[in-house]
Amino acid sequence: MHVVAIVQARMGSTRLPGKVMKDLLGKPVLTRAINRIRRAKCIDEVVIATTIKPEDDAIAALCEGEGWQCFRGSENDLLDRYYRAAQAFNADVVVRITSDCPMIDPEVIDKVIGEFLSLRETIDYASNTLSPRTFPRGLDVEVMTFEALEHAWREDNDPALREHVTPYIYQNPEIFRLHQAANEVDLSHHRWTLDTPEDLALIRAVYSHFGNDRFTWMDAIEYLDQHPEIMEINSDIKQKTIE
């Protein structure tokens, strides 16, 4: 069973343009995220899925320089980009991770994939983002069968939903068998995703403290618990919703 992590990345961003190439302790945000993702033991292959727009040539060039697999597809139809990338790399199981999560944790990735694989005969999709959320925002992992992704690609006719890849799956539990990978303690009040300058300031503060990208998510929890002033940096930021 070929488990492929597909990491969406593009230069366009309404609130923080070029965010995935912003400097994070001397390397691009995207590099930090991929370094962490590649440490997950349950992933067989990592693919960066960017767009065919000229502005995303920078992402393709970084992939080439680092020796990463890169797929280029539609800018706004992310569901199509994911489906075609999964098809191109012969994925049996698709892991969706976004590049604006440079604190993504291999242990959390392996937890979600592990639960999916152990329940493979009875579920189509597993995630730690299903309600009620218990993990920090920015540790988001979605795992699905290629068949579930293909079903959504074929049946979802809403451009607004296709831009977010998976809503057709998790909004239709009568069609798809869903599983929530939950944490024992609710830590969803933490925001570690990168969408604004405030988010970047918090993430840079965490990285500066550890001096590398090998810290665990629980290391970060401990540090932030001890330094609540760091958490205040982006405490007023509201997550964009699917319209």
Image (cartoon, rainbow, N blue to C red):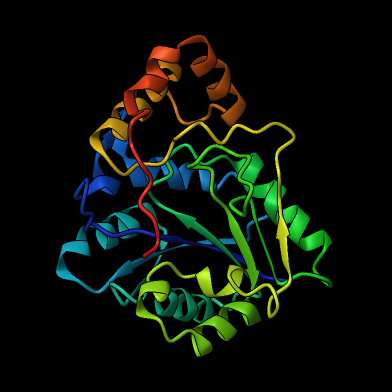
Q: Can residue 197 be seen in this view?
A: yes
Q: In which quarter of the image is the N terminus?
A: bottom right
From this view, report whether residue 163 is shown above or below residue 151: above
Residue sitting at x 59%, y 59%: 142
Q: Position of residue 240 (x, y in %)?
A: 35, 51
Q: In which quarter of the image is the C terminus?
A: bottom left
Query: Relative to residue 185, is residue 212 drawn left or right?
Result: left
Q: Position of residue 148 (x, y in %)?
A: 63, 78
Q: Is residue 78 visible?
A: no
Quarter residue 52 falls in: bottom left
Residue sitting at x 42%, y 58%: 68
From this view, report whether residue 236 is shown above or below residue 98: above
Query: Relative to residue 125, is residue 239 drawn left or right?
Result: left
Query: Relative to residue 47, is residue 199 drawn left or right?
Result: left
Foreground: 212 or 96? Answer: 96
Question: How many numbered marks does the figure carry?
Answer: 0
Residue sitting at x 25%, y 59%: 61
Q: Where is residue 28 in the image (x, y as percent from the top left)?
A: 30, 41
Q: Which residue lies furthest to the left in this view?
A: 54
From this view, report whether residue 208 is shown above or below residue 46: above
Q: Where is residue 119 in the image (x, y as percent from the top left)?
A: 82, 63
From this view, report whether residue 149 is shown above or below residue 36: below
Query: Relative to residue 24, is residue 150 drawn left or right?
Result: right
